[in-house]
Amino acid sequence: MCVTSSGTLKMAESKEEVDVLVMRVVKDITNAFKRNPNIDEIGVIPCPGARYNRSPIVLVENKLGVESWCVKFLLPYVHNKLLLYRQRKHWLDRETLVDITCTLLLLNPDFTTAWNVRKELLQCGVLNLEKDLYLGKLALTKFPKSPETWIHRRWVLQQILHQFSAVARSRKQHHQGEVEQADAERSQQLSDYLARTLHQEMKVFHDELSSMRLWVSMHVSDHSGFHYRQFLFKELITELSQTPACTTTSSSKHQSNTVPSSSSHHHNHGQANGELSGAEAAGGEERWLRFTKILQLFHQEMELCSDLIQSFPGHETLWSHRRHIFYLWHHLRREHQQHCSSNGSVESVHFNNSDPCLPEVGAQSCAGQGVSVNGQKHINEPMEVDAASLPDPHDSKRLKRGIMLPAPPALLSEHNFVSSILDTCANPEQRRFAMAYKKWLDTVIGQQP
């Protein structure tokens, strides 16, 4: 194809001309990423025809657009080019492979062959793992349901975990005192990178949960939307509830291997007097941050349920969602309570609560397991639900114990909510659902310790 002075397209007279023109567009996309490495969204710009002497690739701030007229020429060409390469009928150098697969996956992320080629490039060191996570994130901005993108993303994360595990195993093979400084630094770098990567991955769930808030508010009878929100919510809670025990354990091992016996005796003596080491204090603060975020998640989700139930009476979906969220809290609380009972607790944290029904909530944490409210475990990833962004996990700002926190879900507060609905609502369906929820609270939740 070529562009004439009048701005119209016609088929090129030779294959070489097509090759040159299409690869020029591919290079324009590559150069756009070089000019702005912070591109955060891609899209297709409706444009029926080409414009003379102008690239179809448009970069405005952090948004990358491709004019629609060139997609129908560009996509089949790079698709066929990559297939010929895989069939060993056409040779492409590594740089060209990187550019072609990037262009192809931004336009069609469900092309498995392209992701497989990038896996090979990653394994031979041509690409880095972080770059492919970035490419997948961009593809998901236009194709959020692309299964191949999510599958490749999982594979990349597994490679990161394998690298971290390999370094950890290498360190264990050394005798005490023989771990070199380079290995220690490499291990710390991988640990920090893994923490940042997982933080960013959970931000995807957070962003989805935030975006779904408006959607479910406009589709209050759609069970599928709330089921998806429940999945996202549970994944976030599960991630926050994971204990970062590896840091504490490794710190303890390192101290035991390097601290002289007299210092160790002094350290143990300090612990016996109730003093906490710096590592223990940091671990406790981290667990406290995670606890506050879990509490915020549950509080805001229950608030959303309350608002929707009161604004749109008579929808069973809303009551089912409330039941799911409250049961999730109840289950996690009991699970952690049983765990603490079997392992013993090491500290007790008290904080004021603004709920008049819960003036003060005692919180205990298991050794190395985290803080708990009513027996529920919590633990770090600063997070605000339905807010703009997640703070960095290494942010120097820290919450102070003793601050006012939202009340955790409780059986009494749920009974009060049901009573307020029954006292003020005349909708018969709403009353029926409220009575069914009250019965469920009494028979399922109230009968359990």
Image (cartoon, grey):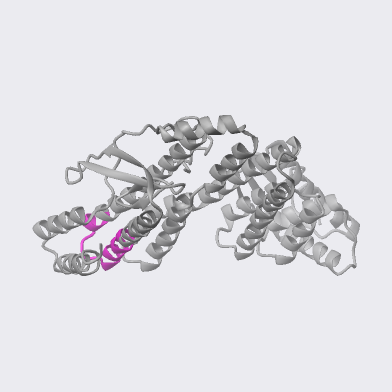
Q: Position of residue 203 (x, y in %)?
A: 51, 48
Q: Position of residue 128 (x, y in %)?
A: 74, 48
Q: How many marks?
A: 0
Res 414 quadrant in image:
bottom left
Q: Position of residue 342 (x, y in %)?
A: 38, 57
Q: Determine if the magenta segment contains residue 317.
A: yes
Q: Is residue 61 visible?
A: no
Q: Is residue 438 left or right of residue 120?
A: left
Q: Is residue 99 left or right of residue 352?
A: right
Residue at coordinates 17% horizontally, 42% vertically from top-left?
356
Q: Is residue 241 left or right of residue 296?
A: right
Give the main secondary structure of the magenta stretch: helix
Residue at far left of view: 423
Q: Is residue 268 visible?
A: yes
Residue at coordinates 34% horizontally, 61% vertically from top-left?
331
Q: Position of residue 379 (x, y in %)?
A: 44, 46
- Please tell me which residue lies in front, 192 or 37: 192
Residue at coordinates 79% horizontally, 59% vertically from top-left?
120
- Please tell me which residue lies in front, 339 or 158: 339
- Please tell me which residue lies in front, 43 or 6: 43
Res 433 quadrant in image:
bottom left
The N terminus sits in image quarter: bottom right
The C terminus sits in image quarter: bottom left
Query: Which range of residues does the magenta coloring cover?
Result: 308-326
Q: Determine if the magenta segment contains residue 212.
A: no
